Image: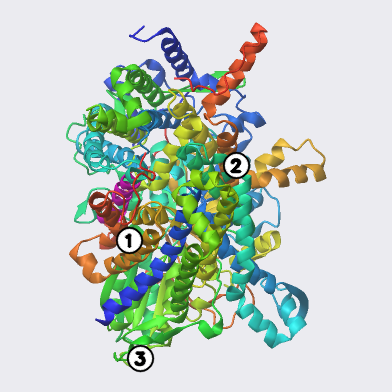
Amino acid sequence: MDAILLQILNGLDKGSAYALIALGLTLIFGTLGVVNFAHGALFMIGAFCAVTLQKLFSLSFQTIDETQTDFLGNPLKVETPYVEAWFGPEVGASIIDWSVPLAILFAIPIMLLVGYVMERGLIKHFYKRPHADQILVTFGLAIVLQEVVKYFFGANPIQTPPPEALNGSIDLGTMIGFDPNAIIYPIWRLVYFGFAVAIIGAVFSFLQFTTFGMVVRAGMADRETVGLLGINIDRRFTIMFGIAAAVAGLAGVMYGPLNPPNYHMGMDFLVLSFVVVVVGGMGSLPGAVLAGFLLGVLESFASTTWATTTIPGINQIIIYLVAIIVLLLRPRGLMGRKGVMED
Amino acid sequence: MTNKSVTRRGVLKSGAVAGTGLALPTIFTASSAAAYTNEPTGSSVTLGFNVPQTGPYAEEGNDELLAQQLAVEHLNGEGDGGCLNTFTSKALKGNGILGKKVEFVTGDTQTKSDAARASAKSMIEKDGAVMINGGSSSGVAVAVQGLCQEAGVIFMAGLTHANDTTGKDKKANGFRHFFNAYMSGAALAPVLAAEMGKERRAYHLTADYNWGWTQEESIVASTEALGWETVNTVKTPLASTDFSSYIAPVLNSGADVLVLNHYGGNMVNSLTNAIQFGLLDKVANGKDFKIVVPLYSELMAAGAGENIKGVLGSMNWNWQLQDEGTKAFVKSFGEKYGKPPSNSAQTCYAQVLLYADAVERAGTFNPCGVVEALEGFEFDGLGNGKTLYRAEDHQCFKDVLVVRGNENPTNAYDTLEIVEVTPVEQVTYAPDHPMFAGGDLGSCNSGA
Amino acid sequence: MFGLNKKDTGLLIIVGILTLLAPFILNPFPADSAMAQFNAGYPDLMQRFVIFGIFAIGFNILFGLTGYLSFGHAAFLGVGSYSAVWMFKLLSYNVIPAIALSVVIAGLFSLLIGYVSLRRSGIYFSILTLAFAQMSFALAYSVLSNPKFNLTNGETGLQVYADDPQILQGANAPDLPHLFGLPMRATYTLDIGAWSFDFNAGYYLCAVVMMVVFYLAIRIFRSPFGMMLRAVKSNQQRMNYTGLNSKPYTLAAFVISGMYAGLAGGLMAAMDPLAGAERMQWTASGEVVLMTILGGTGTLIGPVLGAGFIKYFENIFSKINDNVLHSWFAILPDGLEDAVVFIIHPFIGKGWHLTLGILFMLVVIYLPGGLVEGGQRVSNWFKRRKSGADDAPSGKTEPAE
């Protein structure tokens, strides 16, 4: 029982990342009809926003300490971050400590801007082009973005630890009556799940309860008619692209403490998030979220010893196997609409 | 006119090929001008450096490349000479190899067997490389080693840790300086027993491919021989980026040690996840929970950051060693590039020197001469202490380091501290050891 | 000629001449010159050009004609390679049975996957093929290489060992892939002055095979069957309403293109007897999609151009390192030399991905019809200049077929 609960938690956690990325992909797809292969790269850029902020905070000046030596035997250069010099060691250290949550504020404007520039500068010209061209150009963009990040940050993963207060794990089991140590779970993973739920909730409420959202939904359903009504739907869709980029970026910012960011993390998620979107059904936002969590949970269960001994290698193929089964049983995924991307 | 028809056992078979005469135009079998593949005829000789330059191991590859360039400088008599001054063999004079200036070409393995073979082939076919050096995975090493055997050039492996490279898949033209999984197990086990006791229950997470399996097999065997029990061995898909679902059950499994048979990005993530789950703060079976990472590298340590503190592992070499060879190499590398070299860089540097030295001693670039010169060669002064290139399997036998994540690093580079230098006797095994059985070294191929 | 119209015959002849003379065309620079870095006329790369050309031609039969975008075609290439190496292991190093089996097995495998995947269309079809290919990759990489049942030899790649049965291997046959005794690796090097040209037996085998399959592709494009496939692309629904069942046609196209992929895989193994699982990964499937779009979807020659373009960058640009750069610009004054090297540095060597990504974007932005459209624009420009007449350019460029 405790093992099952643990894997459900793990699944929801993995699913959070899938769902957030898939949500953004579906937003872009549903509004603009563009297959965005650069979406994984946006997730990666988000994570590197946190890396950058952490680096900025830890920008240091060097003082030479004659009493210590570096690896070549020269006097050691001691680095002191500017923030520690300006705000005093304690406040400075805690600013650095909290750089990941602070990066959320930093990342939102950057990701909105990245999304806006991407849409106006590139994607705009591809609305009328075949999906294949969209794939090629966004894939090219994804490669360029990731190589630029590699050029500046290297290929090695970079640690972006969570704040000390949210580091480590808590014993959830004892709170609900299990033995101690039965369900130990990292705090940051719980934070990530909560964050994902909040973002998803915010996006849905935005679309559901604001006029802007209503227009966008109407535009998703019938772009032409909305346009004929004299509403500038293109501008709204551009903003939606920015929001989708921000969702992917925030997913990336918060993901850093779970697994240290590296330049190819976007590609690692790219294919998976497409599978999630399609299993959820093209163009369906709830479908994308549902499929994200569903695949996350199934993936977690498939990696248990019980599953891998029953069917060897099931943990390697589960996502794809589920995708095949779902698509064969439900032609348009879990909640897809008829006629979307079927030709 | 040159003839580059090359066969796997070319020397033995080339006569036979001519004998079949099946639709074989004479140009293919005419007596060739070159005595062996890519015989250097001009005033220079070309070496091929095949390292990952794109993909997750790009940093590792870059470090190897820097070391190889440094070795070329030293061979050509530029720079401070590095390990040429400490190397026990004095055949190298700093005037190139056999008086020929050393040049090099580079290629990108992408850490994929196909791409690695393609770039190695291009260096052999197009650039006339007489030797291929480098790489950072065992799959690539085995693939390129096979290619070099067929093409008739020497392969000096870079970072490859699976037993198979000099076991099941060993080749006469291939040489490995790096240590292997068996040696990791043999070196680690006594230290583990001393630090953690003989009554431990281990849980293995293993990357689900060839290298992971051989390492798991080696560590399980050597720890069980000391009285440990293996609770479970779980294979994780190579493509995994998040290991939470594999880490979560560990604590309730009755284990008190977690062994991570992962490398590179896998290891960084699985270790980070394990620390997140607070494994190191727990007590299981009345003992403090411990984590072991049998194969360490400096770049992984940097990627894992704080998480490696106190975690034990093994290495081929570390820049903090205090012998003359290490000091000379670290000095030249550090002064040129501003950072200490990684252990894969050291292996690639040593391999270039070893190759050049073997050519000098053999008096020829002919791969068969080089093989003969390297087989059973004993040397010192390259940083690993007294070392033997064993003739039976072309594996180097030397001391192995047991290291631990430094609790109080003073700079970005001393993230690991040396716990013990395990003497070579303790990690030596018989050439027909079951973990290495089934291979056939064959005979050297010069490509003629 | 061969039942082709004049234009197609011309295309076939041009392609034939280009492939046969490739060793000359791809080695335009003297072997010792600084520009020799850009020579691509060495056996391995020439073989790759042609083999990936075959792969892309086949992919284009499915994607270019029917519009079905398969994201899992690399699986068939991988299966082809595995079958060929198994033939080497079990029978002999003769490449004929190996290539034959690789085509057959890839055909059967694609029949199976195609039958299931073609129940859906659009992106649902793409994801189904992707899922099958990724499953094949994952299984080949780990589960199917366990010691008890080692079908693929996992990460290391399937290869021939000395203790393999090789029951038909003659005592005197070469110990490497050969065509009735002619080793695939046999290379005759012709030195003319400073130039050096490699004529490789394996390359010419691949080239002949490509000519044959290219001819077949033309026939398919021009046949009623090809017409039917195009009808599927333009409006499948209408086609179904007229009472025609389009599925047998699309399935046939899928299997044909799967067999092309298998053939490419078999040839790859014949040139170099090792089959690795990475050949089946989604990146490999994505690569052939990129090749086809980059060259010009639905055109005959486009996919071959796209394949050549990508393989050229992968193999030539990745090998240019700073040393090479310095040797090129050595004539410049020191400071300027360093500056030039500094500017170019991010785009070559380990930065070759960056260059490729930028070129993808440039091509697709400025040449919607791929490289073929680029070629057409150039030739139109020449034609206009020659005729002097200002025949109004048609608003939309028609891809050449």
- Front disc: 1 or 3: 3
Q: Which residue is mark 2?
A: C358
Q: Which of the two residues, A241 or B37, is positioned nearer the viewer here?
A: A241
What's drawn in magenta, residue-wise?
A: C127-143
Mark 2 secondary-structure assignment? helix
Q: Residue at x 80, y 37 (%)?
A: C332
Q: In the shown orientation, is residue A33 left or right of residue A64?
A: left
From the image, which quarter does the C terminus of chain C lie in?
top left
Q: Which residue is mark 1?
A: B208
Chain letter of the residue beneath label 2 in the structure image: C
**C-alpha distance separating marks 1 and 3:** 36 Å
Q: Amino acid at mark 3?
A: Met
Q: How is the image coloured?
A: rainbow
Question: Does residue A152 belong to the magenta stretch?
Answer: no
Q: Amino acid at mark 1?
A: Asp
Among the 4 quarters of the image, the one containing residue C285: top left
Mark 1 secondary-structure assignment? loop
Q: In the shown orientation, is residue A275 left or right of residue A318?
A: right
Note whether C178 is above or below B163 in the view shown: above
- Residue A175, disc: 3
Have a look at marks 1 and 3 and say if they share a chain.
Answer: no
Q: Residue at x 53, y 68 (%)?
A: B303
- Mark 1: give few (<14), some (14-19) or many (20+) Cα within 10 Å: many
Q: Which of the two residues, B268 or A72, is positioned nearer the viewer here?
A: B268
From the image, which quarter does the N terminus of chain C lie in?
top left
Chain letter of the residue beneath label 1 in the structure image: B
Q: Position of residue A137 (x, y in %)?
A: 54, 42
Note whether B210 is above or below A71 in the view shown: above
